[in-house]
Structure formats: structure tokens, C-alpha cells
Amino acid sequence: MPAVNLSRRTLLGTSLGAAATAAAQPLAVGNAHAAPLAEPDPPVTGEALSVRTQDGLTLSATAHGDPAAPEILFVHGLGQSGLSWHRQIRHLAARFRLVTFDMRGHGASSVPDSPDAYADGARWAADIRGVREAAGLRRPTLVGWSFGALTVGHYLKHYGAEDLHGVVLTGPVTKFAPELLQPRGLEIGAKLASADLAIRVQGIRETLDATFATPLSRDEHDRMLVVNSLSPRALQLGYGLVGGEGVDEAFGEPSRLLVTYGAKDAITRPEMARRVLDLNGAARLSVYPTAGHAPFYDDFARFNRDLERFTAG
């Protein structure tokens, strides 16, 4: 493995994506007094798909719902998995064809041990394309969360938007830039890339605490903490090197684009989401007053309604 220098850009990328991808808030850190929500519903079983990437990895994907129904392909944030979308699967699978997958280095997918495997935006884009083709999606809506939104941008750059129904970005990371981060998001990055396991563990806990505005049950927290722990340090070192050339222009392509942003986001500043309106004249921004960095989770009932209207329209 080549030597890796932890540049400012690498650490910035780490704080943006990993801090944006945990899917639960620990009850013991800054929120111990809050009453937990009810225990989550058990996972919904779908059709398992195995996807081979262009560089020989295997991605784990799952499809739900009627193949003839309107299609939605979900792209999770860094450090998490397709399980992040269980509140969408449970409530929308009866009316839509829903596909989730674990990105490279995540969940049940292949976990390369070299940062180089995560440093190329074209690979992330090709992975999305491979899942789409394996699932036989004709004209899907692409939904990208946090770093997943940036990978959707790379998809648009390499494959265009003409054969998409539309694009939804939720709690999006649209550019690696310090002025678009909240102070807490900047602070977490170095810990997540640390060679010291104890420091990385603390970084993950802080990430989880910062991501959600709504207190979650112990079971939800523990499940997402375990998923975070499956991703290697090589991922944290590599993905921050993904370039942004041409991505802003690509975000301008979709004729239908919805951005959802939580007003209580502790990871990214509002400008991270609002800048998409300047890039795409057709884009619409929807602000969720009570949500944090994951509107689709904090206020899933509203998000599901918005997504249903967007995809059915």
C-alpha cells in the first residue's frame, strides 16, 4: 500500500462524509436525558442482488416492491449501509420499486484495504450504475445522502441525467470545502482518520451524536454503531481524495432535483445545500425545521411524503 499523507483535504473529506453517514444518535453522549423512541421495526426482507464492480469488487444490494412500479435507488452516506433506508422501505415498498445497496467498503460489500480503491469518483459512479443495471431499473429516481449525494454528482458527471426520473439530495455533501461545514463537522475528521483505534472509536461516537436531532432507541444506535465499525480506516484515508472537477456542472443537468436539509444540521452549513439552487435553476430546496443531518430519518414521515410525490409526479 502506498504511503498516504493526511492532507487538509483528506481530513476535510473524512469529516464531511463519515460524520454525515452514521445513522443514529448515542444516548450516552450529550443526550442521556432524552427518552428513547420505541424499538425499531424488524428489517424488511427483500430480493438479494450481487453486483460485480468494474474493478472486481462485489456489492451487496437489495430490491423491494413491484418491478413495474416507479423506481427509487438509494445511495447511503459514508460509514453506513443500505439498512439506513429501512424507514423508507417499510413505508414505501408497497407503491414503489426500491433498491438499496452497501457501497464499496461498507456493510456486506467488498472492503478493499487500500485508500486508492476509494479515491476515484468514477469508481463510485460506476458502482451506482452497476447496481442500477443489476436491478434492471429503467428510469429511477436517485436519492443520495451526505457523501452519497456527492457520489450521485459523479454519477451525473459520467452518465448524465437523461434516463433518470429525477434526483433527491438529502443532508447533502455537494463539495469538499471547509466554509461549507459546521465547526463540529471540521473537528471530527482528524479523529476518524487517526491511526489510534481509541481515537477513531471516539470519532465514531462523536459522529453519531452529531448526526441526528431526534433521540433514537438504544437498538437503533447500536445497530448503526456496528455498521460504522465495519468500514476500514483505508476508506477514511481514501475517499477525501475524490475530486470535484465537473461535479458542479453535473448537478446542473437534472430537470427535476429536490434538496432536503435539516435546520438542526450539526455537520454541514445551510450553504452546502443552498448552493445547489445556484447550480440548477430547476432545483427546489425543502428545509426540515426539526431535522438534523439526516432528514430522511429524523422526519421520515415528511420525507416519505415528499419522496412519494416527487417520484410519482
Image (spheres, rainbow, N blue to C red):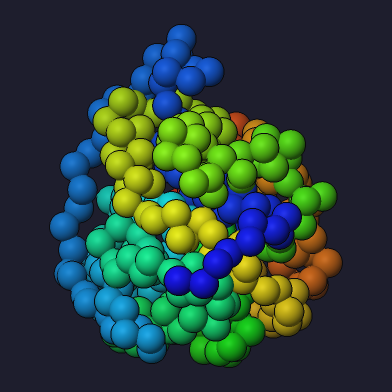
From the viewer's side, name the closer residue of 268 and 112. 112
Q: Is residue 137 above or below residue 82?
A: below
For the point 46% across and 84% down, the residue is: 126
Query: x and y percent of residue 95 in the render?
Result: 31, 64
Query: x and y percent of residue 281 in the render?
Result: 79, 72
From the viewer's side, name the closer residue of 177 and 100. 177
Q: Is residue 217 above or below residue 196?
A: above
Query: x and y percent of residue 181 in the render?
Result: 73, 46
Q: Do we see residue 86 in this rendering? A: yes
Q: Is residue 285 above or below residue 19?
A: below
Left or right of 185, for residue 177: right
The tally of labels here is 0
For the point 55% across and 83% down, the residue is: 122
Q: Do we see residue 141 in this rendering? A: no
For the point 38% across and 86% down, the residue is: 55
Quadrant where the N terminus lies?
bottom left
For the point 58% across and 64% down, the residue is: 4
From the viewer's side, name the closer residue of 208 and 301. 208
Left or right of 210, for residue 42: left
Query: x and y percent of residue 237 in the render?
Result: 54, 59
From the viewer's side, name the closer residue of 185 and 93. 185
Left or right of 246, for residue 63: left
Question: In which quadrant of the rendered view does residue 308 lie?
Answer: bottom left
